[in-house]
Amino acid sequence: MKKLLLVLLSLILILSLAACGNDQGEEPSAEEELTVGFIYVGPIGDGGWTYAHNEGRLYLEENMNVKTIYKESVPETQEVEQEIRNMIDQGAEAIFATSFGYMDYIEKVSKDYPEVAFFHCSGYKTTENLATYFGRIYEPRYLSGIVAGLKTETNQIGYVAAYPIPEVIRGINAFTLGAQSVNPDVTVSVKWTSTWYDPAIEKEAAVALIDEGADVIAQHQDTTGPQQAAEERGVYSIGYNTDMAEMAPEAYMTAPIWNWGPYYVEQVQNVIDGSFESHQYWGGIEDNIVELAPLTDLAPDEAQEKIDESKTEILNDELLVFEGPIYDQEGNLKVEEGQNLSVEEMLNMMWFVEGVEGNIE
């Protein structure tokens, strides 16, 4: 009887030690379900930026045994801090915050929860457990500019843009350079909306550009408002974030698009494996995180051949979007012939290339 008691006590001790070990922050086992949180700046039904991220979340669920939680329409204010803490209270061990304006808040909260892996989209601040991720969307933007440059008859292209930050400015410049590569007479007029998500304001800006003579509308906005304006006014359009063909079938030609799912799977697997490390990810077309959506029948006949040629050159490093000579709006040489902007210079771009009409406010 005493021997049996000793055996039972030994088993209890072993089980107690195992339980204590699990409380001390060991990585979840393959059988345990990791909870992953996503914070969105707009609604998942926006048809653009947030919709693309949510498609990535669904891809993650389909390809991994994880639980995901999300919060829509979280403003870029201190409110995001509370949403992050709420998700951690729900058991989230990895959190993806998907808008630039969340940067300072997620940086702060990451220091309070060193056991959680944080990921911030489009920002530049990191901590030991906060990574940043984005893509070289300027590559497919350059390609979409080729389509617009071949299509326009007025040589006036309108661009509806959210905020004058490097991410947006870089895209406008890449788009313009792409258009000018096939049509040197092109100008690109920019109207700022000071919003990421407001279909009415975005549509209004597009209408104003059309009234000024633009016969192709492009955008860096989260909704399909500019596409719908183009269709209603009988001009053509270049979308953003997702394939918007169904939203404006009588106007839309193509769009630079995002494919977030594979990155989410890779990083969540790293969290599960215990191999997550802070990093700054900036993938390109070769990584399949960014791409140009298929051309519709409205695109010029010669566009596909030119797109295929330029895409191959980008993949082979034969075409560098920001290789000189490049001049700014005032005609000043910004990038000398044979030189290329560094990553740091691209990430801090606050000037327009020659041919862009509009101010950086």
Image (cartoon, helix red, strand yellow):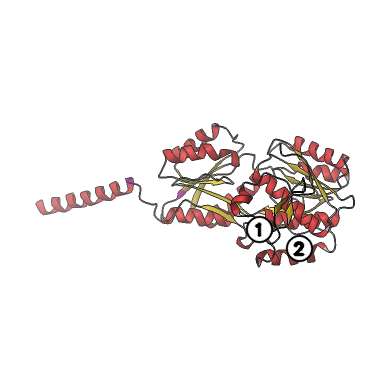
Magenta stretch holds residue 310: no
Amino acid found under the numbered disc labelled 2:
Ile
Where residue 340 appears, x then y in whole percent?
65, 58
- Read off the residue under disc 2: 307
Camera-nearest residue between 8 and 65: 65
The label on residue 340 is 1
Please report the residue visible at 64 percent of the width from the left and 43 percent of the height from the top: 44
> Do tag 1 and tag 2 residues touch (Cβ < 8 Å)?
no
**Which quadrant of the structure image shows residue 43?**
top right
Residue found 82% across the figure and 59% down from its top: 182
Q: Is residue 28 magenta?
A: yes
Residue drawn at the location 57% of the way across and 46% of the way down: 121
Nearer the observer, 264 or 334: 334
Chief secondary structure of the magenta portion: loop
Q: Could you tell me which secondary element the residue under label 1 belongs to?
A: loop
Q: Is residue 179 left or right of residue 348?
A: right
Counting residues from the start of the chain, the first of labels 1 and 2 encountered is 2
The structure residue drawn at horizontal position 48% and vertical position 36%, both measured from the top left corner, is: 86
Q: How many marks?
A: 2
Q: Is residue 360 left or right of residue 100?
A: right
Q: Quadrant of the C terminus?
A: top right
Q: CA distance from mark 1 to mark 2?
A: 21 Å
